[in-house]
Image: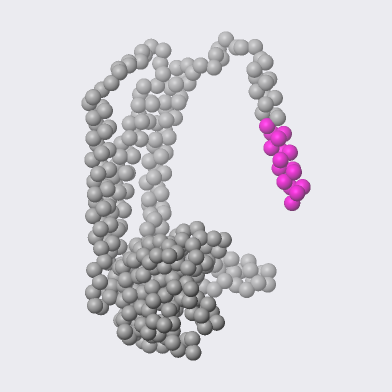
């Protein structure tokens, strides 16, 4: 490894030395009458046309990218408020795209139209109130529209009006995994604190206060189950560093900060089963499994175990770089009917049963 590094360093230094010698050789040559180092009309004409060609290339690449990879830009929403979030995103994209298209077109067009020419004399003027008003007022109106629309959408999404039917779930973050805590029959989560984590031989996974009777029937799991078409209120806390609870399909993201409890709520409106049947997801799963199959053949040839087939699931990810194993911090989310959720919940072990 050391030899490879030394070889690379030697090649880099040799390349620099050759480049420097080339520059010295060029400077030592007598000045040619036709090469003054100043761009002439032909140079300006070529550069002006190249700017125009680059503009065409830029727009062609943008359009191609939208058609080619637009399906991976944003997965289909699986929550009620997701449509509002998506509308805000596309509204912002549209304004930015229109403004960028106009400004880039003018920029490249002016570079082409007003390219250097010996017969053309530049016109200078100290100021223009009209131009200054245009490039001040128009961006201000556009930005105000984006900010106000975004603020109204934010207030609408973040205003949590809990109802009696809402499911309250605590999301607990720690390096490098997630845990979820549900309240039992009493519908109230027990108090919790990191000071209680070492209680009961380490079985107190999220630090539930053993003296609080409300926590006795709490259920702690590492796979999140949510009933469809029912509001879910998340209480989010962290054991160690700042994490970020990120559920891309539900358009939900909220930081988990040590020492404080954050809150977010949404209503899932698509079950896992329904999402797996959507064409977009079916095509994605097929593409991934084709890649995994090719990789499995390579592993089998080496005598190693093949990869398991991929199956779509909603995921809770950490969207904050929280340490070396940040990328492994995922939790599976199952969205199901209310009846299926109740059947699953009845099978879970309560905190009191777990510590006995």
Q: Is residue 41 above or below residue 303?
A: above
Which residue is most to the front? 211
Q: Residue at x 41, y 12 (%)?
A: 118
**Where on the picture, by quarter, is residue 130?**
top left
Q: Is residue 31 above or below residue 53?
A: above
Highlighted range, magenta: 1-16
Q: Nearer the viewer, residue 296 or 261?
A: 261
Q: Is residue 311 visible?
A: no
- Where does the image place residue 339, in percent across and percent down from the top left? 31, 84
- Where does the image place residue 267, in percent across and percent down from the top left? 29, 70
SS assignment for the magenta stretch, majority: helix
Does the stretch in magenta take in 257? no
Which residue is most to the right? 3
Q: Residue at x 25, y 78 (%)?
A: 165
Q: Residue at x 23, y 35 (%)?
A: 137
Q: Nearer the viewer, residue 272 or 332?
A: 332
């Amino acid at each position: 490894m050391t030899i490879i590094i030394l070889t690379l360093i030697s090649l880099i230094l040799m390349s620099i030395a050759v480049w420097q010698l080339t520059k010295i050789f060029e400077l030592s040559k007598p000045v040619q009458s036709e090469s003054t180092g100043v761009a002439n009309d032909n140079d300006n004409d070529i550069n002006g046309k190249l700017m125009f060609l680059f503009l065409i290339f830029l727009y062609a690449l943008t359009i191609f990218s939208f058609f080619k990879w637009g399906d991976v830009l944003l997965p289909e929403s699986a929550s009620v408020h997701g449509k509002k979030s998506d509308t805000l995103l596309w509204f912002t994209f549209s304004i930015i795209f229109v403004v960028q298209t106009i400004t880039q077109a003018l920029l490249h067009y002016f570079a082409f139209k007003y390219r250097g020419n010996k017969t053309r004399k530049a016109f200078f003027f100290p100021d223009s109130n009209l131009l200054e008003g245009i490039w001040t007022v128009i961006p201000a109106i556009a930005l105000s529209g984006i900010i106000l629309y975004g603020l109204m959408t934010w207030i609408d999404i973040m205003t949590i009006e809990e109802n009696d039917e809402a499911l309250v779930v605590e999301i607990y973050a720690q390096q490098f995994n997630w845990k979820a805590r549900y309240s039992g029959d009493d519908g109230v989560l027990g108090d919790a604190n990191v000071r209680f984590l070492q209680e009961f031989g380490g079985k107190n996974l999220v630090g539930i206060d053993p003296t609080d009777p409300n926590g006795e029937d709490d259920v702690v799991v590492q796979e999140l189950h949510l009933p469809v078409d029912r509001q879910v209120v998340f209480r989010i806390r962290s054991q160690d560093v700042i994490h970020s609870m990120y559920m891309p399909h539900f358009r939900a993201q909220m930081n988990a900060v040590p020492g404080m409890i954050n809150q977010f709520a949404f209503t899932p409106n698509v079950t896992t089963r329904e999402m797996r049947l959507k064409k977009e997801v079916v095509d994605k799963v097929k593409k991934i499994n084709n890649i995994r199959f090719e990789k499995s053949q390579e592993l089998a040839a080496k005598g190693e175990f093949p990869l398991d087939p991929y199956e779509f699931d909603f995921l809770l990810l950490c969207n904050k770089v929280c340490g070396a194993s940040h990328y492994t911090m995922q939790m599976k989310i199952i969205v199901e009917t209310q009846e299926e959720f109740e059947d699953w919940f009845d099978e879970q072990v309560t905190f009191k049963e777990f510590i006995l």
